[in-house]
Image (cartoon, grey):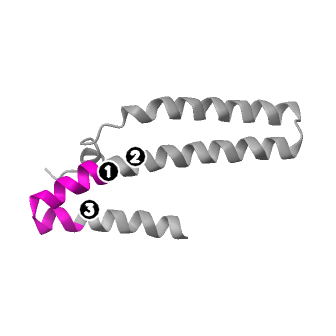
Amino acid sequence: MTKTRTDARRYSNHDDALPGLARIEGQIRGIRRMIESGVYCIDILTQIRAARAALASVSRGVFQRHVEHCVAHAMRSRKRGEIDPKIREIMHVFQREIR
């Protein structure tokens, strides 16, 4: 049976991202309430920017753990079949971020 991308991602522990995601969920609910209440546009945009920054912070943490755990494991294996896919994954992430 072939390992899926989801299976591969289970190697890293991302539990420390959960509190940040819970805060972001709260921020999003707050933004929704602001919109429903007719709050001033700039105030809503400020909160959206804060939520995006918080999400970027969680993203950086997940990426760091990926590099420290998954990519480092592939590099230590010295197997091209493990290294090359990790390099492609990282390049794909960077290419999406650049767009």
Instruction: Note whether 31 is above or below 71 in the view shown.
Output: above
In the picture provided, is 98 more to the left or to the right than 12? right
> In x, y percent, where is residue 83?
19, 64
Is the C-beta separation of discs 2 and 1 under 8 Å? yes
Residue drawn at (27%, 41%) of the image: 10
Which residue was labeled with disc 1? 66
Q: Is residue 77 left or right of residue 49?
A: left
Q: In the rendered structure, which disc, 3 or 2, sits on the residue that comes first in sequence?
A: 2
On screen, 12 above or below 60? above
Q: Check contact, mark 3 vs mark 1: CB within 8 A.
A: no
Where residue 33 sits, quadrant-wise, is: top right
Q: Residue at x 45, y 31 (%)?
A: 18
Which sits in the foreground, 37 or 79? 79
In the image, 93 versus 67, the foreground residue is 67
Residue 89: x %, y % from top left: 33, 63
Position of residue 21 in the picture relative to residue 9 (left or right): right
- What's the distance in space between the residues labelled 2 and 1, CA to CA? 6 Å
| Position of residue 37 measured from the top left corner of the image (x, y, whole percent) | 86, 30
| Residue 27 colored in magenta in the image | no
Residues packed near mark 2 inside 10 Å, few (<14), some (14 to 19) or many (20 plus): some
Query: Badge 3: few (under 14), some or many (20 or more) residues near its Cα, within 10 Å?
Result: many
Question: Image check: 65 left or right of 49?
Answer: left
Q: Which residue is the site of mark 2?
A: 62
Residue drawn at 37 percent across, 69 percent down: 91
* Disc 3 element: helix
- For marks 3 and 1 on the same chain, the one whose residue lies earlier in the sequence: 1
List the residue tagged with mark 3.
86
- Image location of residue 99, percent across then percent down: 55, 70
Q: Camera-side residue: 68 or 94?
A: 68
Q: CA distance from mark 3 to mark 2?
A: 15 Å
Magenta range: 66-84
Question: Which amino acid lies under the numbered mark 3 shown in the image of this protein?
Answer: Lys
